[in-house]
Image: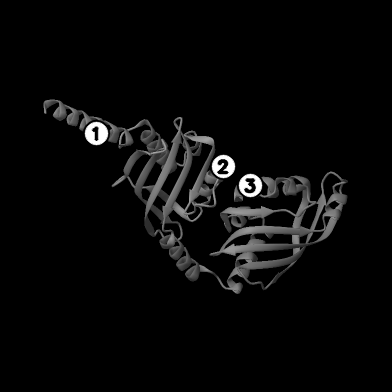
Amino acid sequence: MKKLSLLGLLIILFTACEQTQRYTQNSAEIDAFKAVIQNYNDEDWEGMTAHYADSAKTFNNSSDVSLTLDEMVDYHKQSLINLSSRSFLEKNQEYEMVLTDKGDTWVNFWSDWEGTLKANGKKIKIPIHLTAKFLDGKIVRTSGNWDNTPKILALQEIDAKNNLSPEDNRAVIHALYQSFSTGDIPGVLALMEDNIIWNEAEGNSLAAGNPYKSPDAVLNGVFAPLGELWENFRVVDVKLHEMVDDEVLATLRYKGKYLKTGTAINAQAAHLWKLKNGKIIAFQQYVDTKQLADAAGE
């Protein structure tokens, strides 16, 4: 009888040890994933990806479409466009590590994500569950599941309130050309969204820097060279044409003299502007690039 009791106790102890190995809330893998979450909050993309294997795949609200490491980082960066801040809240965070019957190591994470919209300062809180598969101390797969509806509805509400009429959009572009004609470049840049996408016409020497992705990039890559290469470069005969979907088309002419050759131009051009909430978010130039190249002696 004593032998049977001892055997039963050993079985219980062995089972308890096995359960401890299969589930825990303290491990090196959990510590690594805690670092990933902190890196995300700090926008430390290099530090975050250091915890991933080079071939890692990320699945967000999908079991079919995966992201590479670079695509995952770009996804997180793009999500910042409409937000002034965002992070996983420290309160009520939960981590667990599970060793499956197949011997795979997974870390589960639950938390509330909170973001603040740039346009109106509204805070959005979304519960999120993330799970990460580890192999040899590195994350090889992550899956995330959350309901993005609150954020989508909030952004749609902003768009419905703030989208401007075609007349208002043309007024913004008219103000831009007025500022440019008087040399008020800061006034021109102030009308651009921080994430503007600016493209010079193909064949234009300045197109080598396409796309310019910020007002500073436009200033240094487009406006500064214009001042250095041309004498009295200006736009004339500007006509604004009504468009839909927050776009404005401008037809105009470029005039000026190329400094190195002394050749003057009178080139036909068109500008397509895209706006959102009164700010310019995209620009595409069309111009007689042959006349520009001839003036430069190219």
Closer mark to the observer between disc 2 and disc 3: 2
How crowded pointer 3 is (Cα within 10 Å; few <14, some 14-19, many 20+) is rated as some
Nearest to N terminus: mark 2 or mark 3 = 2
| Res 107 quadrant in image | top left
Foreground disc of the pair 1, 2? 1
Disc 1 target residue: 16
Element assignment for label 2: helix
Label 2 amino acid? Asp
Q: Mark 2 points at which residue?
A: 70
The quarter in which the C terminus is drawn is top right
Answer few, some or many: residues within 10 Å of disc 1's Cα (few below 14, many 20 plus, some between 14 and 19): few
Quarter of the picture holding the N terminus: top left
Residue type pointed to by label 3: Ala
> Relative to the observer, which residue lies in front, 284 or 21?
21
Q: How far apart are marks 1 and 3 (CA)?
A: 62 Å
Q: On the image, which quarter does residue 132 sit in?
A: top left
> How many numbered callouts?
3
